[in-house]
Image (cartoon, rainbow, N blue to C red):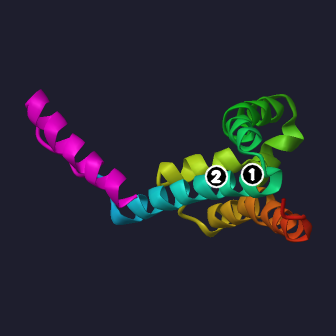
């Protein structure tokens, strides 16, 4: 994360110099913290899929399905079923992660939504995967 911020800083300085515009530093500390947390949540989802599936190829494909296909399906479901519209932020991992990247997780309810999606998509599957891994035979 530190390397990504360093590259972003260099890109901001170089890009503004090449374009001949003033360098703008408009990311607050709280927004930067939420971006780091969003990246950590993304890595935790990948770790969880790896532990649960225990096959690298399946975990990689599943990560892309969870992060690219499933959000579209959930948005579509929310647009056609009114009852799901209020439920979506509580179960859609991508919805809460995007809010983190935008620095828009500010209220207690939004943090509770993040906690709910983290519990559903990371904590529970990781515990199940670790329990299964603990009982598996080493080959």
Locate residue 40: give its quadrant.
bottom right
Is 74 inside the magenta-drawn segment? no
Give residue 49's mark.
Answer: 1
Residue occupying image coordinates x 72% and y 50%: 89
Q: Is residue 101 left or right of residue 89?
A: left
Q: x and y percent of residue 121 in the render?
A: 77, 56
**Nearer-N-terminus badge (1/2):** 1
Give residue 96's mark.
Answer: 2
Check the image and report above or below for 58 versus 113.
Answer: above
Residue occupying image coordinates x 80% and y 59%: 120
- Classify mark 1: helix, strand or loop: helix
Q: x and y percent of residue 112 in the render?
A: 69, 66
* Residues at marks 1 and 2, CA–CA distance in whole angstroms: 18 Å
Residue occupying image coordinates x 73% and y 52%: 50
* Residue lying at the far front of the rendered structure: 139
Q: x and y percent of residue 15 in the render?
A: 18, 35
* Residue toward you, 69 or 45: 45
Q: Is residue 111 left or right of residue 120?
A: left
- Classify mark 2: helix, strand or loop: helix
Residue occupying image coordinates x 9% and y 36%: 17
- Give the dominant element type of the magenta stretch: helix, strand or loop: helix
* Residue toward you, 118 or 3: 3
Is 20 inside the magenta-drawn segment? yes
Q: Circles 1 and 2: CB distance less than 8 Å?
A: no
Q: x and y percent of residue 80 in the render?
A: 84, 28
The range drawn in magenta is 1-25
Locate residue 48: give its quadrant.
bottom right
């Amino acid at each position: 994360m530190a390397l990504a911020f360093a590259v972003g800083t260099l890109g901001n300085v170089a890009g503004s110099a090449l374009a001949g515009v003033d360098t703008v530093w408009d990311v607050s500390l709280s927004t930067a913290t939420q971006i780091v947390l969003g990246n950590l949540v993304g890595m935790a989802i990948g770790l969880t899929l790896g532990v649960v599936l225990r096959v690298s190829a399946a975990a990689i494909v599943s990560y892309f399905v969870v992060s690219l296909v499933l959000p579209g399906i959930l948005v579509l479901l929310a647009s056609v079923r009114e009852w799901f519209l209020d439920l979506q932020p509580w179960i859609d991992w991508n919805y809460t992660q995007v809010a983190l990247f935008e620095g828009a997780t500010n209220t207690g309810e939004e943090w509770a939504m993040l906690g709910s999606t983290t519990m559903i998509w990371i904590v529970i599957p990781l515990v199940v995967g670790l329990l299964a891994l603990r009982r598996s035979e080493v080959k």
